Image: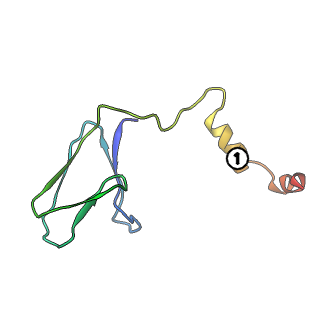
């Protein structure tokens, strides 16, 4: 799926939800508040100080990465079912492990 997912840091409240946008979107963040020490950190790397009115533009890179690959010989749900013991009698499995 080609998309942007914008997720707030510490999104543990009901109103702080992720937003899914088309990959053709250009996301613009403008610093409107003047608080000393406001910084932006990208991918956990070096932080950069921001001044009031500065803009951060986020758009799709010409490069892509494959994060998951589904193989026909290893069906995804069969793999999950096996690893998570879905639909199995766990009591029988526990006895077999000893």
Q: At numbered mark 1, what does the secondary structure look like: helix, strand or loop?
A: helix
Q: Residue at x 36, y 52 (%)?
A: 43
Question: Relative to the observer, which residue lies in front, 86 or 30?
Answer: 30
- Residue 33 in the image: x percent, y percent? 14, 69
- Residue 9 in the image: x percent, y percent? 36, 63
- Residue 60 in the image: x percent, y percent? 28, 38
Give the side of residue 14 with respect to residue 81, left or right.
left
Above or below: residue 25 compared with residue 13: above
Q: Residues within 10 Å of mark 1 (few under 14, many from 20)?
A: few
Above or below: residue 3 compared with residue 38: above
> Farthest residue toward the front?
46
Instruction: Look at the image and tell me in which quarter the C terminus lies.
Output: bottom right
Residue at the spot of label 1: 83
Q: Residue at x 69, y 50 (%)?
A: 84
> Farthest residue toward the top?
72
Q: How many marks?
A: 1
Give the side of residue 28 with respect to residue 11, left or right.
left
Q: Residue at x 80, y 55 (%)?
A: 90
Give the side of residue 93 with respect to residue 60, left or right.
right
Q: Residue at x 65, y 44 (%)?
A: 80
Q: Quadrant of residue 52?
A: bottom left
């Amino acid at each position: 799926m080609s998309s942007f997912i914008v997720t707030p840091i510490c999104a543990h409240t009901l109103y702080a939800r992720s937003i899914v946008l088309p990959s053709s979107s250009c996301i613009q963040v403008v610093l409107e508040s003047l608080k000393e020490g406001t910084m932006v950190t990208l991918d956990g790397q070096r932080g950069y100080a921001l001044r009031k009115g500065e803009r951060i533009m986020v758009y799709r890179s010409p490069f892509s990465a494959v994060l998951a690959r589904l193989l026909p010989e290893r069906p995804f749900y069969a793999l999950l079912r096996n690893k998570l013991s879905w639909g199995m009698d766990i009591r029988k499995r526990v006895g077999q492990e000893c």
